[in-house]
Amino acid sequence: MRALLRDLDGLSRAGLACLALLVLVALGSVVHLGGDPDAIVGPRLQPPGPQWWLGTDNLGRSMLPRVMEGVGTTLLLSSVAVLVTAVVSAGFGILAGYRGGYVSELVLRLVEVLYSFPAVVLAILVAAVMGPGQTAALAAIVLVTIPLMTRLVRAAAAGVARRDYVTAAVISGARLSRVLGRHVLPNVSGTIAVQGTYALSVGISVEGGLSFLGFGVQPPQASLGVLIRQGGTYMIAAPWLVAGPCAVLVVAILAINVLGDGLRDRLEPRQPRSLT
Amino acid sequence: MRLALWWSGRALSAAATLLGVSVLIFAAVRMMPGGFAETILGPFATPEQKAELAARYGLDQPVFLQYGHWLAAVAGGDFGTSMISRQPVADELLARLPVTAELTAFSVAAALLLGVPLGVLTAVRARPRGGAAAGRLLSGLGVSVPEFVLGSLAVFLFSRYALGVPAGGYVPFGQDPAGNLASMVLPSAVLSVFALSATARTTRDAVLGVLVEPYVTAAVARGETPWFIVRHHILRNAAGPVVTLVATITAYLLGGALVVEYVFNLPGIGSYIVQAVGRRDYAVVQAGVLLAAAVFIVMNALVDLAVGALDPRLGVTGKGAA
């Protein structure tokens, strides 16, 4: 871990620091560090001031604890979704890459179907089927991020499967689960880590977009997308309602992307970055 | 012969994917909450009424038969009827196509006309002043700002300070050409930020990849001018990834400019789908999502053909563009 940190360049370390700060902020909101997000503390739509650092919203709630809660919701939702994606993609990707043949063909076909939907369209279809809410947002992030990660893990695993140490393990009588878990998985973990990082930024942006359209996290719970949607109504009179959550959202996505670039340079040199 | 075989294989694979997509969408729509009968008849319908309705619309048949009927209808251009407006969905979508197409055209044009030269320039010029980190941060910012953030920012700035361009709404081109173009400026600008940054990044990577080729070194050694080298040796060889990316962006925008159309209140296909999901107008959701995926799949297949034409080696070795 320390070696990894040393190898990251300045920009990526800054990204990591930003992300750590956001996680701390989210943890702080659990113990109401910035105040109670649901408490009405003052007049409506007040600009930022010493009592409410980010202003107050249309009900007179302080925006600071709301944004902190929003960061927590968004980060938690996206991380859980990406964990699910990582497990599913790693499982199918490694199996497909190692086995090749019709297994690989089948997995690639299924993934291709998911890949054919624009991200927001797929997310909205999920929301329409499951009904708006946190679960829909979670499922949407998983389905949007699975195709790319599965493809790349499969490609990496197909490369690893031809290596001598894998052949040696098979010859020495290792079971399939041991070959995959002990010899293939560790050698594709770099790809999983890098793609997981990018998937996290995609997840944050999908959650934001879905909640912004009104199909993701539902108020009164705060997420960054919900706050931006709610603030949009009062944008002309009270731009700070939108400015705070927007700034945090952009910083979060940018920090994660930069971190992902650094991780990629460190963990898998010469692999071009993909876009979606 | 070999090429024709490869092409027909590509077309078959696209058809298979499209079929998979249609199964997924059909299943998804059937799982949506609020049954068809309840939606049409209201909550107080008797079982007999429901049964009659189910018989009339074929809902009492086995699922795979229903799927077959639906697929046949869709193949014939019949996407069903909107439950809200009672109009054929195909007509409604067609009426909204010009808005979405115009938006897509402007954004893709910006990406091509600005993004490609920018990518080539930053790749050919050795190191931009200000350091590599600044460039990385800037292009990273372009692909990191979600559309709804940028859109909200634009709406705020342009509606608060009256900067001369409308921040929402749509005027048909036939009615008022100048007003139509003005109403397109902001949404296209917002959409093209991502398209432009992505195109510039991809072009830069592709050109950097070609620059190390021996034939470029040979051209430099022959004393050819940089501009000549770019035109004759680099552009076509670097075109593959850029063409793929631009086509992907085009397909995504045609089917999925949902957020921007919603933010700027444009009556395009995207905002129609958003509206339909909100109103539980499932026929529209089904058709819109299917179209978006179909456009993407067809575009993808076309891109493979185009890339194969640009670089004939790919077709002959039987390997499509990744």
Image (cartoon, coloured by chain):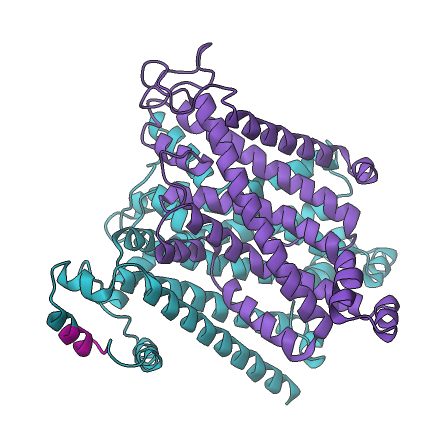
Chain colours: A purple, B cyan
The magenta segment is B51-58
Position of residue B38 in the picture relative to residue B145 (left or right): left
| Image quadrant where residue B64 sits | bottom left
In magenta stretch: residue B207: no
Does residue B42 appear in this view? Answer: yes
Question: Magenta stretch containing residue B52, yes or no?
Answer: yes
Residue B251 location (% of width, % of height): 47, 61
User: Residue A187 or B200: which is nearer the viewer?
Assistant: A187
Q: Position of residue B120 (x, y in %)?
A: 68, 50
Q: Is residue B138 visible?
A: no
Q: Looking at the image, is B204 positioned above or below residue B289?
A: above
Please identify the quadrant where the N terminus of chain A is shown.
top right
Rendered residue at 74%/65% (across/down): A157
Q: Position of residue B132 (x, y in %)?
A: 74, 37
Position above or below: A201 against B20:
above
Q: Residue furthest top?
A: A50
Residue B159 lies in quadrant? top left
Between A215 and B49, the residue placed more toward the observer is: B49
Magenta region, main secondary structure: helix
- Residue at 36%, 58% in the rendered image: A129
- Look at 14% across and 70% down and name the residue there: B47
Residue A22 left/right relative to B27? right
In this rendering, position of residue A120 left or right of residue B10: left
The residue at the point 79 percent across, 52 percent down is A269
Report the side of B29 relative to A255 (left or right).
left
Q: Is residue A47 above or below residue B138?
A: above
